[in-house]
Amino acid sequence: MTSTSPTSTHQADARQGSNAVAHTAVTIEDTFWAPRLQRVREKTLPTMHEQMQLNNYFDAEKRGWKRGMHPIPYVFWETDITKWIEAVSLSLATHPDAQLEALLDKTIEFLRSIQQPDGYLNIWFTEVEPEKRWSNMRDLHELYCAGHLIEAGVAHFKGTGKRSLLDIVSRYADYLDQTFGVEEGKKRGYSGHPEIELALVKLYRATGEKRYLHLSQYFIDERGKQPHYFDEEARLRGDDPRDFWAHTYEYNQSHAPIREQKEIVGHSVRAMYLYSAVADLVKEEYDESLFQAGERLWRHLVSKRLYITGGIGSTEKNEGFTEDYDLPNLTAYAESCASIGLIMWNYRLLQLDVDSRYADLLERALYNGMLSGISLDGNKYFYVNPLESKGDHHRVGWFKCACCPPNIARTLMSLGQYVYTVSDTDIFTHLYIQGTGNLSVGGHDVQVRQETNYPWDGTINLEIALSEPVDFGLNLRIPAWCQEARLSVNGETLELNHVQKGYARIKRLWQNGDRVVLQLAMPAMRIYSHPDIRENRHRVALQRGPLVYCLESADNAVPLHHIHLPEASPLESHFEPELLGGVAIIQGPATVVESDGWGETLYQTTPPPSHAHTFTAIPYYAWDHRQAGEMCVWISTQ
Amino acid sequence: MTSTSPTSTHQADARQGSNAVAHTAVTIEDTFWAPRLQRVREKTLPTMHEQMQLNNYFDAEKRGWKRGMHPIPYVFWETDITKWIEAVSLSLATHPDAQLEALLDKTIEFLRSIQQPDGYLNIWFTEVEPEKRWSNMRDLHELYCAGHLIEAGVAHFKGTGKRSLLDIVSRYADYLDQTFGVEEGKKRGYSGHPEIELALVKLYRATGEKRYLHLSQYFIDERGKQPHYFDEEARLRGDDPRDFWAHTYEYNQSHAPIREQKEIVGHSVRAMYLYSAVADLVKEEYDESLFQAGERLWRHLVSKRLYITGGIGSTEKNEGFTEDYDLPNLTAYAESCASIGLIMWNYRLLQLDVDSRYADLLERALYNGMLSGISLDGNKYFYVNPLESKGDHHRVGWFKCACCPPNIARTLMSLGQYVYTVSDTDIFTHLYIQGTGNLSVGGHDVQVRQETNYPWDGTINLEIALSEPVDFGLNLRIPAWCQEARLSVNGETLELNHVQKGYARIKRLWQNGDRVVLQLAMPAMRIYSHPDIRENRHRVALQRGPLVYCLESADNAVPLHHIHLPEASPLESHFEPELLGGVAIIQGPATVVESDGWGETLYQTTPPPSHAHTFTAIPYYAWDHRQAGEMCVWISTQ
């Protein structure tokens, strides 16, 4: 965060990769996440299935889908089903549940019943307009649907050991492999909405079948080439390519080959899914030009187009990026799915190069922009996560385009995977969540137990459990938000002069029962914006630990834009166990400008008077759970 | 402006009306306006006619107008012709010009040639879709066109003494009188775009024919009644009234009868033209409920929905009003025509009640929001007058919808009328412009000569010329922006304790050669916004005399949003004769925040550093005359 942060020297260091750890290897046993995950299992997942039934997800006819509809409906609805399958499968992997599993089997049977003899599987293009298969890959999401289906198949296989859905998706993927590619007779197409690319890497990793990896590489390499596939495809349909509603292929990141892309543009979820796949491919077969493309886009994102909440996408128009420093608060798009995509991408980047700037951003999106997407009780959702509200923005139970709810569910159900990655010689700790990681380093089983009240408190106690002493490096992320960290091993203080790319590395012959204590100072802090973010002129945000805060009318009985936070006023924080499921609030002295006494005029020669006010700020993720009212993240200074 | 201004006690006083003075009675001989008016005569009026010819205004076929076009083109283009006729006629009244008069005659002959036997006159509904006459009064501007035609006819008659156009418009008005009204067999319609109402009052005043006044009263009284005419008319066309694109009759101020309207809403030009007519009708036949309606709407406008420039209309969507205090700067609409409408309305209100709050607002719109609409060289125009620009907003030579250019021209050509109004006992001086007013008070001719360098200097020397001593009250407006005024008669200081509703009244037996000196202190001032205008939080505007100022990139070589104006820093102003045709600029010390050294991040824990900067501000009306760049009226404070 600051220029003196431990991450500042990362560019000089060599890259060090790490490997993913399955979510099943990490237990979540804290008071912050564990109750949330339980609510997802017990409430979110069953009510989602009810919502899908209510909305006739399993019956195209009842759903009202008809040939020639204009505009074409959300033909990608089936991804809500497949993301739900993925979320349930991830849950079953750690928490068996016969009822949910039966629901899953029934849903998979539905999918099996509509798979075509050649392996193709898509509700709209099977039941409504079969002759239009692959006729509009720019807009109609067939490969996007295929991707989520494949992710579901892999998760189901891993979570239940059953091959039922994996076999279906493998047949489909084989058909795709025969259909797309540079070889004679194959289509040179790719998907307007990326997703298939990362899914095929997952399928490759689950099955070992290299053709899936190669198909993913094809989709990545082909994208943006000239003559442009979407132009040709449009002409084949009898359409003029210039009539593309978005007016630019930046919208779907096919404006240029990926290795030539220099700026993060277009629909933000598409960008995140695409560049996640790019990172996956670099991980599988190292490719410097692809790595550098991703790196360049990442830097552009974080230096010009990122909300402090880890939200991305500044406008509803393209559900995506606009211009540098254009980060409006009230009209921010910041789709929940885009923050999830940001988590996915940074998680993959951490595997290419263990650098805390990726984990910092993953944490920022996880605790703020993503988490705000689901209500505390687990059954209402934000699609859009603005940083300011006049009081008319509220979570709802379902959406006509309901991509976000099951996406949030699958993200939470896989939370464990984000805590650690490992290499042959090292364990990397990215997130601080109470629970146990059952890891493997250089062939040795190592158990790491975290005890902590994070994110409310910055003290993390780690205990190592081993059957025999093992020599490895334990790397602990020092978050960029932390300006004062202390570390000890078995009671002995360690100097923090071995922080590399944001990780304090403790290399030693670890003994069973070794104890490490990391203390991250976690005061409430003011955060300032780059001077070119016009909306945030004369404003500060408040942050404590990984949590970004906001003001809400429920705590501040004056118009929020009347509140000014003087530069030098102290910030105090304490935990309120009864508030919003238990949150640390931030309070302090502020002033409130008065609009009384202005009379019937808008402009006058003296500034308005002010009076004292004690403001209260709550974590951003917890807003909109009380009476409807204003909210703002960026608070006026004085 | 301030709560201690001389206008603060107006509510307690009785109303005093005054009468209009023709623009021909007042000469303009200063260095500010006179050269502008000369450019309008010599350049603006001829080039406008060229633009209309270039754009095939006089040939519907060449213009490409065809039956059944969708969307329907700007069928009200003919009002550009008629407003041009009005502007030329106003000019000819004071500056005969054979060439312009010949052009006028030819244009009037064109209009005569398309007038129908029944008196009807409209290009679209005569030449393209005659069967659709009066079928869509909500959208298709027939009566709006009729109104501008009538205004042109009256101005032409007054300016040239010729009846050629007056006869045409009288025939048309007679046909309208036979067509619309509450009587059996007449249509109960009125115009979606007001204009006919004020035009009919003008025609009544020019001809003495009461039926025109009564028809105007009918249109005002009928508007907004239930069942709603526009609903019924839509159903007659086979349309569903709910499909009205604007979704609300607030758009055209027909959502309620005028006497019941409480808030200023909808399309801002329509509102101004409508309420101007309301004031005209009150002037002709006093009606307390109509007067109070206008007064209520005026108060709502100035207390909630007015830009500091005298611009009105916050959004392009409805070219009009939005919500209270919603006054964005970058996306302000503030159409030139709307500021003109504001001038028209306040000029009429001054005739109902001589109160300087009306003249203050008239002056504000005249010197700022209207004047910015035309380039210094008189041949490029703004349609939209934002209060902030990123550098991409520029005046152009013509518009597809070119309502503003001829509207500005006719306003400037009639400027003299706004300087004075009179009553039987008093002369009221509203504007300070060097020149001579040839007035009449209680049957006596009185000449008032102003010598002043206003708006650059606040000293106004007035000399009274009379053939014999006359007893009358000379009222001089003390502008609300002025915090220190001095007044003397023949060298003897007068105490300013007789200021009533913003006018210092000097009642005496005036002698030929009496001299009055008014000194209005005119320092550069900071202006603050109502705290509920969110965009102007922590910002000040600069004003000197009636002129609102702005920063431009041309004078300030840093991003304008990086400039901060400390609260206590002094403001200096001086006249620059070579700059922008001669302007007083405002300068002073400011600070500039630095964005260098932030590195690749958007957010950090310390505010950006600043360095000193001397800012330069120019009058708002003069912006966008040098290299393209940013502009802002509201400047950050520190």
Image (cartoon, coloured by chain):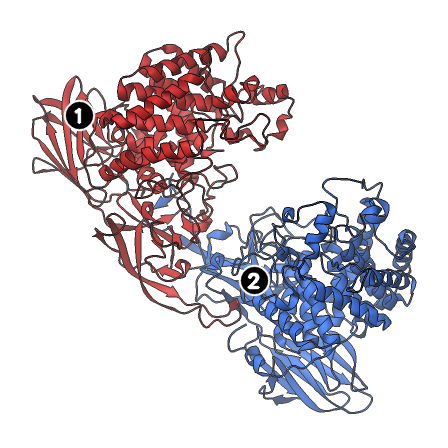
Chain colours: A blue, B red
Q: Amino acid at mark 1?
A: Asn
Left or right: A241 in relation to B61 = right
Relative depth, front residue between A446 and A286 = A286
* Quadrant of the image occupied by residue B567: bottom left
Q: Residues within 10 Å of mark 1 (few under 14, many from 20)?
A: some
Q: Position of residue A492 (x, y in %)?
A: 64, 90
Left or right: A157 in relation to A430 = right
Residue under mark 1: which chain is it in?
B
The residue tagged 1 is B438
The disc placed on residue A305 is 2
Q: CA distance from mark 1 to mark 2?
A: 64 Å
Q: Position of residue A206 (x, y in %)?
A: 84, 71
Q: Is residue B578 above or below residue B126?
A: below
Q: Is residue B578 above or below residue A482?
A: above
Quadrant (top left/top right/bottom left/bottom right) for the N terminus of chain B: top left
Relative depth, front residue between B379 and A472 = B379
Quadrant (top left/top right/bottom left/bottom right) for the C terminus of chain B: bottom left
Q: Position of residue B488 (x, y in %)?
A: 12, 37
Confirm whether residue B452 shows in the render. yes
Name, please, the residue furthest toward the top: B184
Residue under mark 2: which chain is it in?
A
Confirm whether residue B282 shows in the render. no
* Quadrant of the image occupied by residue A548: bottom right
Q: Is residue A630 above or below residue B474?
A: below
* Quadrant of the image occupied by residue B556: bottom left
Relative depth, front residue between A53 and A71 = A71
Q: How many marks?
A: 2
Q: Amino acid at mark 2?
A: Arg
Q: Residues within 10 Å of mark 2 (few under 14, many from 20)?
A: many
Question: Element type at marker 1?
Answer: strand
Question: Element type at marker 2?
Answer: loop
